[in-house]
Structures are given as structure tokens and as C-alpha cells.
Image (cartoon, helix red, strand yellow):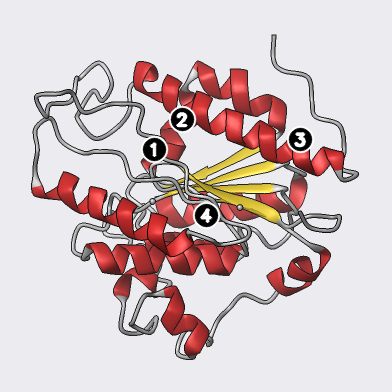
Amino acid sequence: MRDGLACPRAPRCLGAPAAAVARETGRSRKRRTSPLRGRRGGSEGAEASGKMSGDENPASKPTPVQDVQGDGRWMSLHHRFVADSKDKEPEVVFIGDSLVQLMHQCEIWRELFSPLHALNFGIGGDSTQHVLWRLENGELEHIRPKIVVVWVGTNNHGHTAEQVTGGIKAIVQLVNERQPQGLLPRGQHPNPLREKNRRVNELVRAALAGHPRAHFLDADPGFVHSDGTISHHDMYDYLHLSRLGYTPVCRALHSLLLRLLTQDQGQGGAPLPEPSP
């Protein structure tokens, strides 16, 4: 699956192929130290997962990844992210699946996002419920980013579009105002997974319409050609973005981040960092 107020402003959430951006107020900062556990069964939780409570919707029930490989890799990455949150002071935090994780390896990350003091909390294979678990277990507890970007949802294979939307909405609620972007099209040719992602985009866009601090950003710069195919130059395996494919997505996201950070600066925030040469 991404969002004026008095200073300091709450982090905004962005969604880029399922990302969200949230800005924080002083009030939301106080709440962030106590995650929304135990509330999904109430009216707020039911709203966060559509018509289902968090217990009824597996996509919005915080769940750690099972260590089927026995190498502890996922939990090790989570612990590293928690440590980073204690040691660093990012302006922007990216959290999500492999689409976030692999972005960090591209030159465009250094060009566009490193100057914004961004942290990358992406783990390949994560679904919405895994991101929720990570958020509830320390990854945002010690940092006060101005913007949180969430990009997740394409790995929710066994969930319906409505369940995935509920998971994304639960993340948006947990981070306190985010802006999810749409899910990227998936597969070389038209297929049910691509259709489900399109439906998730529609549902998330509708769910966030009118949200005072959340914006839906459609980060699909035309990956699907007129004949319904996707080029391997944009997605080398028809799922993950190539370096070429990341460029239009990241530039669109970067423009939105700059706009949000500039708004924050106009209300008394710190000056924006100089871009990377």
C-alpha cells in the first residue's frame, strides 16, 4: 500500500505503491509512546479494518513473521531498526516491504532521500500485519520524524482487497496520519493479483478522501502499457522495480515530501537540508 496545523506539526504519511506520510503534533507525539493495542476491538479498531475488528481481519492484526528459515533474519532486522530509532534523528522514515528495502540500494536514494536524513525500515516479504507488529514493537518509539512513508500491501497474497485496505488503514491510524500511495501493478500481463492491487488502490483512495492529514499519492507513472503488459526494464521480475523503474516513483514521492517539509518549515520548522551533489 502514505498527510495547517499549529507547530510542531504531526508527521505526514505518504503512500507510494502503498505508502503513507504522517506529520505529528505535540499531542500525537504523547500518544505515540503507547501503541493502539487493545483498541482494535472497539469502534476505532472496526473503522481501521473496514467492517471487521482487528481480530477478524488478519491483515490488520499485528503479527511477527514466522522464522521458517531458522536464521532469525527478520527479527534481527527489526532489532536493528529499533536501535537506529534510538540513535538517529531522521526527518523522514520509510517503512514497508522489499520495494522500500531495495530502494536503499539505488543511487536515487542517495540523491533524493539521504539529504532528507531518511531512514529505511524496509523488509522483503512483509505484509501489512507484519508492519503493524514492527510499529507496535519499537520502530517508531524513539524518533520524531516529520514524515513517515509507508509502502506495503502487495505481499498480502491470501487476503482480499478489503482486508488489505483494512490493514493499510490500521497502519495509517497507528502512525497517526499518513498518506498511502497506491500499490504498483504486478506481473507482466493482466492477472488477478494486479486486479486486486488496483482494487486496493481504489478502496484506500476512497477511505482517505477528506482525511485532514492523509493524502493518497498515485505513484504509478505508467508501468502498464496500452497492450496490458509491463516492461522488464521497469520491473525486472514484474514485481520489484528496477533502477529505471524507481526513478519516476521516487521523483514523484520526493516532490511531495519536499512540499510537506516546506510547509513545516514555513510554520517554524528547521531549514531543509541541501540536496546531494
Is any atom of residue 132 visible in this view? Answer: no
Label 3 belongs to which residue?
Answer: 262
Report, in whole angstroms, how far the alpha carbon at label 1 lies from the one at label 3. 26 Å
Residue behind mark 4: 78
Q: Which residue is mark 2?
A: 103
Residue type highlighted by circle 2: Met
Q: Is 69 situated left or right of 181 in this image?
A: left
Instruction: State the CA–CA distance, disc 2 to disc 3.
Output: 23 Å
| Secondary structure found at label 1 | helix
Q: Secondary structure at mark 3?
A: helix
Q: SS of the residue at dot 4?
A: helix
- Vertical order, 189 against 233 (above or below): below
Residue designated by label 1: 99
Q: Earlier in the sequence, mark 4 or mark 3?
A: 4
Residue drawn at x 29%, y 49% as measured from the top left: 154
**Cα distance in 3D space between marks 2 and 4:** 18 Å
